[in-house]
Amino acid sequence: MKLWHSPASPFVRKVMVLAHETGQTGKLTTVEANTNAVNRNEELAKDNPCGKIPALVLDDGTVLFDSRVICAYLDSLHSGPKLTGSAIAAGFRAMVLEALGDATMDAAVLTRYEQALRPAEYRWDKWEAGQLAKVNTSLDDLEARWMDLLEGPLSVGSISVACALGYLDYRFPDSGWRESRPKLAGWYAAFAERPSMVATKP
Ligand code: 99T
């Protein structure tokens, strides 16, 4: 299977971490996508019309996106403990945790594009502040309400949150997100040492 890939993308990392955790990296051939919101890869766009990564091209030509669908698909292919969907004990709560991690990544990636791609004369500080507010309130919620699930069995929810935090460290190293969130910081320090996270660090 061909995976449109970039080491910088937290969404791609989420898929790769799940592939590592379920012993399936050997099934994936990664192809560097080199795409962003203003310079998209037209070859990638033939597979995923919105030009985003990750996108997974199956051997019969079927294309799967986005990261949630790809993670659910890869999880259906192995016989070990499941990490996604209503079959796992944490069920819909784990799915919401995944949605929260994904939403944090979305807001952080949009902030990154704003800072790195948008010409200075077109920037709108209020819009960027709105995205950063999403990141901050999501992290506060993780600290306040989600530690039980994060500290429980591995799930796609914990993988998504870890990839969101890894992305903040990668693109926003001075964000100071740990300062008011000691439980989340402690959990992430341990999670980041998993071989799947070490192998996919950008
Ligand atoms: O916005 C674009 O056109 C290109 N952006 C992407 O492909 C980003 C790469 S992160 N991917 C997504 O936004 C995927 C979101 C989707 N809902 C999913 O797969 O879950 C690149 C970050 C960086 O380079 O800093």
Image (cartoon, grey):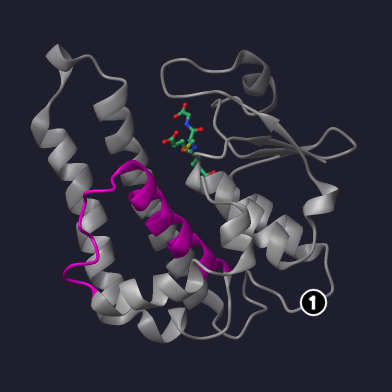
Residue type indicated by callout 1: Gly
What residue occupies the far right of the structure in this picture? 60
Determine the residue positioned at 84% across, 74% down.
Answer: 79
Magenta span dominant secondary structure: helix
Residue located 67% across and 50% down the image:
70
Residue behind label 1 places its C-beta within 8 angstroms of ligand 1: no
- Local packing at callout 1 (Cα closer than 10 Å; few below 14, some 14-19, many 20+) is few
Residue 178 seen in this snapshot: yes
In depth, the one of 16 and 57 nearer the eye is: 16
Q: 176 or 12: nearer the eye?
A: 176
Q: Is the residue 83 above or below the residue 8 in the image?
A: below
In percent of width and height, residue 5 lies at 63, 36
Query: Is residue 45 found left or right of 60 in the rendered image?
Result: left
Instruction: Return the residue at label 1.
Output: 80
Where residue 193 appears, x then y in whole percent?
53, 69
Element under disc 1: loop
Q: Position of residue 23 (x, y in %)?
A: 79, 64
**24 in magenta:** no
Q: Is residue 113 above or below residue 25?
A: above
103 w.r.t. 46: above or below: below
Q: Is residue 170 magenta?
A: yes
Total tally of numbered discs in the picture: 1
In the rendered structure, which segment of residues is drawn in magenta? 156-181
Residue 102 figure quarter: bottom left
Q: Position of residue 182 (x, y in %)?
A: 25, 77
Residue lying at 28% horizontally and 45% vertically, measured from the top left:
172
Left/right placement of residue 93 relative to residue 146 reads right
Q: Tell me the quarter of the picture where residue 130 sits.
A: top left
Whether residue 68 is visible, yes or no, is no
